[in-house]
């Protein structure tokens, strides 16, 4: 079966996720819980417990072995010990079962404690053959659309007709998320554990094929297959659905002894962030923001922009919105003339008109006036209208005066044709029943102000176009690249490790990066003589230092041979690099590329020089990049105004700067199997060109 795009659904996983019968292998409390949860959520098919000695499990008659089952089960929960799990999988595969959940732990996640953990996991994969399975070391899944609960614990889901899916690597996090009381309809929640056979990306693709699934939330500890993740993101877009993720995991790369600023600023975490961004997957910083983003996606889909029209009946709430919004990628645009005229007609002269708007309590309870006020705000260029509305406690107070606000929001959304939300500043002040009512009315119910604003920014990001070009992988031959021909190979095959600065600059020059004139010499007198040949002023650098500035091995602006000799004597080394002094710089930048084994090559652009790690003004992307993407990334830096020309000063040669970045990319593509790291810091950017005055290149060992 193929869709219109030619995509073939994973029929084996579909059978597992939407079973007509379920087998439960094992007799402990966990297996009894699976039987209980299937009953509780209303599974309409057969449930077949399997145990060699027990007559029943969870109150249902048991079969002695999987071979005694009436037929090949669509889905199986395997709740036996890790050793027995392998043979159960083998028997199920031979029987033609659809798929399984492997609950047992003690596999690759426990290799430090159990020497055979990795071997056992490999044995699982071999035993299963083509039959998919989730885990090991996972709870499984609950499909609330089908009433299928291969889940050995309690959960918070109820039957649903449509809703979002949430997939995690952590079973306990999935359990916690299932207990949310925010009104978010969760149609499916699933876990993958060790991802031995099915990872998040493959499971995500299968889940999204169900037209009743509106959006996908991911809790990611690590991305195992970059190409698979790219396919997941592309398929989601084809289906008109969006993905939001929370990504955990500090970089192991950044913890190693870094020989460059690039290594200290990037790594696996930065690579994962760049991969998500490139694939068009929104990344959020908390579970709360994950849930709030899913609410927006389920209710109205991705937003057209991050421009928010905010309305509340309190000046304090209006200020809280404005101040909290400073930390998130949202904007509160100034009111235009049409908005002002409409608001003034409803609110009169006593209310100060602004966005965020305090519409005061003059119109509280006046349904036509509230509807007119909200509709007037929505007449402007906004991607989402938000009405701040915190409900009173239902056990102590009446919410009768608050409910008409929902009518007004619904009417304004209908009149404007634009998405609207109610936003409770606290989780506690949005009752679940109210949230569910909002969804039924076409209103997005948001709560927890910081998480809600982060979610709005994430949903707006998901409305932007996506780069479809696959990332440059770190292993194997480089893929065809659309940005130009790859240059010839420049490196000698015997070279490895950290290259000398002179050698690094020669390589950069060979791909078109401008570098200073320079001479490498040994001895103080030779350094002084070389300086005379280059012409003053010069720069003197001692060789053999990774961080020359910290070691006192750099002297700038030396104006005579005597000054060069004196500086050389003070450096405590015998090798020197003598260079022409580059002057007339507008700004210093860092351009770095770092090999990330998990995600590809991470490009870092940022403020350079000795203050790189102090300022930490950087952006990261994955190679390959296009010139327009480089320009866009540079515009995101805090120092972007300096690049453009600050307060009448000269700006930098932007075309030359972009070309230098593209030249670094050409070198990496040409040597994709050997490059570990390239760093230019600083790249001195002038009005009439850019010059790499310091460079580092590190090659893989063992080539």
Image: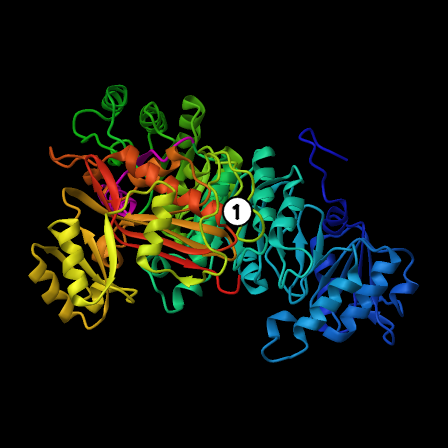
Residue 52 vs residue 450: left or right? right
| Residue at 50%, 42% in the rendered image | 279
- The residue that appears at 21% across and 63% down in the rendered structure is 549
- Which colour assignment does the render follow? rainbow
576, 679: nearer the viewer: 576
Can you see residue 251?
Answer: no
**Res. 23 visible in picture:** yes
Residue 294 picture location, percent across and down: 50, 44
Q: x, y (%) of residue 266? A: 38, 56
Q: Quadrant of residue 349?
A: top left
Indicate yes or no whether the magenta region holds residue 325: yes
Where is residue 203 shown, x and y percent of the image? 65, 50
Closer to the camera, 209 or 361? 209
Report which quarter residue 206 is drawn in.
Answer: top right
Residue at x 74% of width, y 34% of height: 2
Left or right placement of residue 209 versus residue 95 in this view: left
Residue 152 location, x and y as percent?
68, 65
Q: Is residue 560 magenta?
A: no
In the rendered image, which residue does mark 1 sit on?
184
Above or below residue 427? Residue 623 is above
Classify 509 as above or below 98. above
- Would you identify the image quadrant in which residue 352 lies? top left
Q: Nearer the viewer, residue 542 or 231?
A: 542
Which contiguous range is marked in magenta?
304-326
């Amino acid at each position: 079966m193929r869709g219109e795009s030619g995509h073939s659904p994973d029929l084996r996983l579909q059978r597992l996720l939407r079973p007509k019968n379920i087998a439960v292998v094992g007799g402990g409390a966990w297996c009894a819980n699976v039987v209980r949860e299937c009953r509780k959520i209303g599974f309409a098919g057969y449930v077949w417990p399997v145990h060699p000695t027990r007559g029943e499990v969870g109150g249902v008659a048991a079969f002695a072995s999987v071979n005694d089952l009436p037929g090949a089960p669509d889905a199986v929960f395997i709740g036996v010990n890790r050793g027995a799990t392998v043979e159960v999988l083998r028997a199920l595969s031979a029987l033609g079962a659809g798929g399984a959940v492997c609950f047992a732990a003690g596999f690759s996640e426990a290799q430090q404690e159990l020497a055979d953990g990795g071997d056992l996991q490999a044995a699982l994969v071999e035993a299963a053959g083509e039959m998919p399975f989730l885990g090991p070391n996972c709870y499984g899944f609950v499909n609330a659309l089908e009433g299928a609960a291969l889940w050995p614990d309690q959960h918070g889901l109820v039957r649903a007709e449509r809703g979002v899916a949430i997939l995690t690597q952590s079973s306990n996090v999935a359990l916690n998320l299932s207990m949310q009381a925010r009104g978010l309809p969760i149609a499916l929640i699933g876990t993958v554990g060790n991802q031995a056979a099915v990872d998040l990306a493959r499971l995500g693709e299968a889940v999204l094929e169900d037209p009743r699934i509106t959006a996908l939330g991911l809790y990611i500890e690590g991305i195992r297959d970059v190409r698979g993740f790219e396919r997941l993101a592309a398929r989601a877009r084809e289906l008109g659905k969006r993905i939001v993720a929370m990504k955990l995991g500090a970089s192991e790369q950044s913890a190693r002894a870094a020989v460059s600023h690039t290594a200290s600023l990037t790594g696996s975490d930065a690579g994962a962030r760049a991969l998500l961004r490139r694939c068009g997957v929104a990344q959020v910083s908390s579970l709360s923001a994950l849930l709030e983003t899913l609410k927006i996606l389920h209710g109205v889909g991705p937003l057209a922009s991050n421009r928010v029209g905010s309305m509340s009946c309190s000046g304090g709430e209006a200020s809280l919105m404005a101040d909290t919004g400073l930390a998130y990628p949202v904007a509160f645009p100034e009111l235009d003339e049409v908005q002002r005229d409409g608001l003034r007609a409803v609110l009169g002269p006593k209310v100060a008109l602004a966005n965020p708007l305090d519409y005061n309590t003059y119109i509280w309870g006046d349904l036509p006036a509230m509807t007119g006020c909200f509709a007037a705000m929505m007449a402007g260029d906004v991607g989402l209208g938000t009405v701040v509305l915190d409900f009173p406690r239902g056990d102590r107070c009446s919410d009768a005066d608050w409910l008409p606000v929902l009518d007004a929001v619904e009417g304004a959304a209908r009149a404007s044709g634009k998405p609207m939300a109610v936003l409770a500043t606290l989780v506690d002040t949005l009752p679940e029943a109210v949230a569910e009512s909002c969804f039924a009315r076409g209103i997005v119910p948001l709560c927890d102000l910081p998480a809600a604003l982060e979610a709005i920014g994430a949903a707006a990001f998901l409305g932007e176009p996506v780069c479809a070009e696959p990332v440059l992988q770190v292993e194997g031959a480089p893929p065809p690249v659309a940005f130009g021909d790859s240059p010839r190979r420049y490196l000698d095959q015997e070279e490895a490790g950290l290259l000398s600065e002179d050698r690094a600059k020669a390589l950069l020059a060979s791909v078109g990066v401008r570098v200073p004139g320079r001479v490498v010499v040994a001895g103080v007198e030779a350094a002084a003589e070389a300086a005379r040949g280059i012409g003053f002023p010069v720069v003197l650098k001692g060789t053999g230092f990774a961080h020359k500035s910290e070691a006192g091995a750099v002297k700038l602006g030396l104006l005579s041979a005597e000054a060069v000799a004196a500086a050389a004597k003070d450096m405590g080394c015998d090798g020197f690099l003598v260079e022409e002094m580059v002057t007339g710089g507008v700004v210093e930048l860092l351009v770095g590329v770092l090999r990330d084994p998990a995600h590809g090559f991470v490009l870092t652009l940022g403020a350079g020089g000795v203050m790189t790690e102090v300022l930490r003004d950087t952006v990261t992307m994955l190679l390959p990049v296009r010139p327009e993407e480089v320009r866009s990334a540079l515009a995101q830096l805090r120092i972007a105004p300096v690049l453009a020309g600050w307060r009448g000063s000269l700006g930098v040669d932007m075309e030359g700067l972009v070309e230098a970045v593209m030249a670094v990319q050409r070198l990496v593509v040409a040597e994709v199997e050997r490059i570990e790291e390239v760093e230019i810091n600083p790249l001195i950017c002038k009005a009439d060109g850019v010059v790499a005055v310091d460079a580092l290149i590190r090659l893989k060992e063992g080539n």
